[in-house]
Image (tube, rainbow, N blue to C red):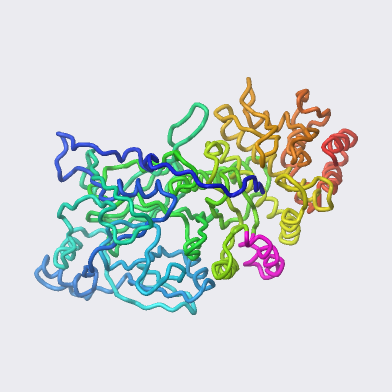
Amino acid sequence: MRPRFFILALAFSAGLLACRKTETIQSPSSETSPEQTPVCYDCEYLRQAYADVEDHATQLGGHINNPYLIENMMQAYKNLKGQYPAQRFSSNYLYIEFRPADFQQLDQLEEKDVDLFDYPLDQKLLTEGDYFLQPGKSIEDIPSYYAVVPANFSFPAGIPYRVIDEMFIPGNDPELEIEALRITNNLDEDDEPAFSNNQLNKKRHDEDIADSYGHSSSATPSCRNFPSGQILVQNALLVDNNYRGVREVRVVVRRLFKVERLVTDAHGNFACNKYFHNKFTVLAKFKDKYARISRMRPWAIHEQFFPIKINFGRWKNLDCGHEFRIEHPAAAGTIATSHWCAAITQNGLIEHHEMCNELNIGTPPMGLTIMLSSEKGSGHGNTYMLNKMLHNNAAVNGAEVLLASVITILNPFAGAAAAVAAEAYKYRAPDIKYGYGDDLSYLTTDRYCELVYHELSHALHYNAVGNDWWIKLGMAENKNPGVGTYGECCTDKAPRIALAEGWAYYMGHLLADKKWGMSSTSFPEQGDFDTNRFMLEFSNTTGNSSHQNFLETYDPFKIDDPNHWIPKGLFYDLTDSGTEPLQSRVVDEVSGFQCKHLFTALHSGAADINEYKLALLRENHNYMRDQVINLFHQYGY
């Protein structure tokens, strides 16, 4: 847990680069006919909207006739075949409105893992934004949610809903589908202007910015109607600004009532199996078996129950394997910044699991609730494990005490807003929180990955020691008096904090070195983060990355570092070999331990760093006993 920064004013840059580098304004190629030219109707608008620090609303047009009603599909069949089918079409999908009454029902509904939309699907979609203010609702009200579900869907008990339409939606029968679209006036073949801010009727700001959008590339009919692509995130490393795939991210493609959900592969690729006629929207959502990554909000708190969503645009004639690029942000705290951080976190979750398995140690719990906050700096993280504990009957009481102690950190508002937040967090609180505001220098790939690995290693620790241990840690970190990130060194609370943070710093930098090595960037550490004084700069040297150098040269005697009592280099000193650098001022005579030995001792449930020392010796038959005791003593334990 690293609460390093005070809340500062967020930086904003109107010139933030596009989330999709390939989506640049171009003139059509002379070799590409207008019918084949890929067109995105709202990409330029989205680029501008995501450069903002405020959410932007979904924009809808007029009502549409549902082409997939049984009667319409029957008529389309007759028009094509000259007669009705021998057997009446049966509904295979339902168009539903859910009406969750409270946050408990909202939590249950989101856990059903249905693709929910907070706007009605029977209106023309101009551009899907971050929220939709429904008629008669305030921004704080839980809205209705609309979905298309299989006809045999098992509805969650107790949550009000209504079936709006019963439908027959063919997966791949273009001829039948096109005829149904035609007779209901939903072919939508006409050209339309690019969506821009001057069409808005709801928005947070009144900027008058408008631009047109075109895209030039070749596209075969199969790709135009069976969308495919690659979700990529840009690296920000010492010598690498290339793009890499976003792994196992959910992709949702929608046109009218037809929805397909896919998951990207190890390279970020996806390909639809269903036919989409034209003008379909491509969304990415950050939710998988490892975690749900959402964005914290001080208002409309119901929205943070849902994963971060990137709208990659409403497309016609999308080219095969289109690259949807999430660029490195030009400013901290913007919506686009949260997208980049979510993508880094998404990959980091999988990388952390893989590297922990390689090290033969445990892994964090599955299904984590991760929230990103612009109200904290980009180097800031906390691992509360609140959602896991609040959904565990045995731990709920202690978790509610911990939640009450940190609620003003999670939501700094008072009065009615605080009461709403407190109720919401009972049902969906963060297990882990990462910052994406304040200091842009923390937003390099290796540094943000180190933060991700650090907090996930806390979650790994939680998985090993359980709820009671973690509640005590949370209360200790919240109550420990004194200056610095973690308070004073010599209180009764400090040894527990020292164990948890020493382990997490070790794992964060160890895995960052393992993943990024000599591509890592330089970073400041071992000083006063509150005043930015007495900092040391850690950089790559011959054969050693900046992260390895930090662990190897950490100086526990540097008293102008208020956090010097956190044993950030101890665990690495237990496992490394060779001569200790002079600048660490540590005499390290210990070698031969492996990460799995350190984890086994952690798994013992040792209450603090002093008990951990004893557990480490006990589990390893007093291997190098005197040298281990001496090493711990130099770190103050």
Where the C terminus falls, by quadrant?
A: top right
State left or right for residue 521 relative to residue 567.
Answer: left
579, above or below 307, in the image = above
Residue 358 position in % (x across, y down):
63, 40
- Closer to the camera in the image, 354 or 536: 536
Residue 28 position in % (x across, y down):
18, 37
Whether residue 34 appears in this view of the structure is yes
- Closer to the camera in the image, 229 or 437: 437
- Closer to the camera in the image, 386 or 6: 6
State left or right for residue 318 relative to residue 151.
Answer: left
Identity of the residue drawn at 54% across and 46% down: 350
| Magenta-colored segment: predominant secondary structure | helix
Whether residue 223 appears in this view of the structure is no
State left or right for residue 144 relative to residue 349.
Answer: left
State left or right for residue 210 relative to residue 459.
Answer: left
Q: Which residue range is magenta in the image?
A: 386-408
